[in-house]
């Protein structure tokens, strides 16, 4: 299979799945560590828990969503609708990929690279920078070669 839009979607769904898994793991670890403590006002600690989940899980989730949205533009380019730049989507997707990889931060929130998912974030930023036309041609079969 050589469709670039398919691989953009795979990359996006992997990031979304990873973000959900990280969020669920943080939620489960919080329940395991602090679940046995009886608190009169657990509101403050609930805010802390959801802030930690947001910091760790939202960047790859956003990057995955935007990679899936960008895959539609790649599919359109593959089918012949070319030379449309989609500048806003490209910039936001590239920044979300870099945020997911821990390269840039947002409002002071940034994480160091965490292995495989940081590579997916860098790949998302790369396809966004190169554009839909280039990405559509990336896995295209070579036509006219002797």
Image (tube, rainbow, N blue to C red):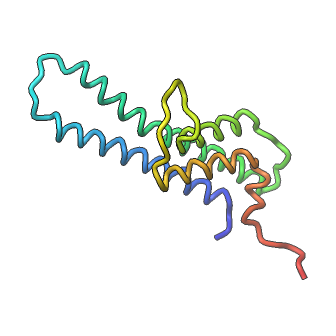
Considering every residue shown, the one lying at the far bottom of the view is 146
On the image, the x and y values in percent for residue 47 come to: 31, 23
Residue drawn where x is 43% and y is 50% of the image: 17
Q: How many marks?
A: 0
Tell which of 106 and 64 is nearer to you: 106
Percent coordinates x, y for residue 89 in the rendering = 69, 37
Q: Quadrant of the C terminus?
A: bottom right
Side of 45 where 20 appears, left or right: right
Q: Residue at x 49, y 47 (%)?
A: 113
Q: Residue furthest top?
A: 41
As drawn, the residue found furthest toward the front would be: 112
Q: Position of residue 55 (x, y in %)?
A: 42, 33
**The N terminus appears in which quarter of the rendering?**
bottom right
Q: Nearer the viewer, residue 21 or 48?
A: 48
- In the picture, residue 91 is in which quadrant? top right
Residue under the point 63% across and 37% down: 95
Residue at x 11%, y 17% (from the top left corner)? 40
Report the side of 124 relative to 36 (left or right). Answer: right
């Amino acid at each position: 299979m050589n469709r670039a839009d398919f691989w953009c979607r795979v990359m996006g769904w992997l990031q979304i799945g990873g973000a959900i898994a990280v969020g669920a793991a943080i939620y489960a670890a919080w329940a395991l560590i602090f679940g046995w403590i009886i608190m009169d006002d657990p509101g403050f600690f609930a805010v802390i828990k959801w802030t930690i989940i947001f910091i760790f899980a939202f960047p790859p989730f956003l990057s995955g969503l935007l990679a899936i949205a960008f895959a539609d533009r790649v599919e359109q380019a593959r089918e012949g609708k070319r030379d449309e730049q989609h500048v806003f989507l490209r910039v936001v997707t590239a920044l979300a990929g870099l945020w997911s990889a821990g390269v840039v931060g947002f409002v002071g929130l940034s994480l160091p690279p965490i292995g495989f998912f940081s590579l997916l974030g860098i790949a998302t930023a790369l396809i966004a920078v190169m554009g839909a036309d280039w990405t559509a041609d990336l896995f295209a079969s070579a036509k006219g070669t002797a």
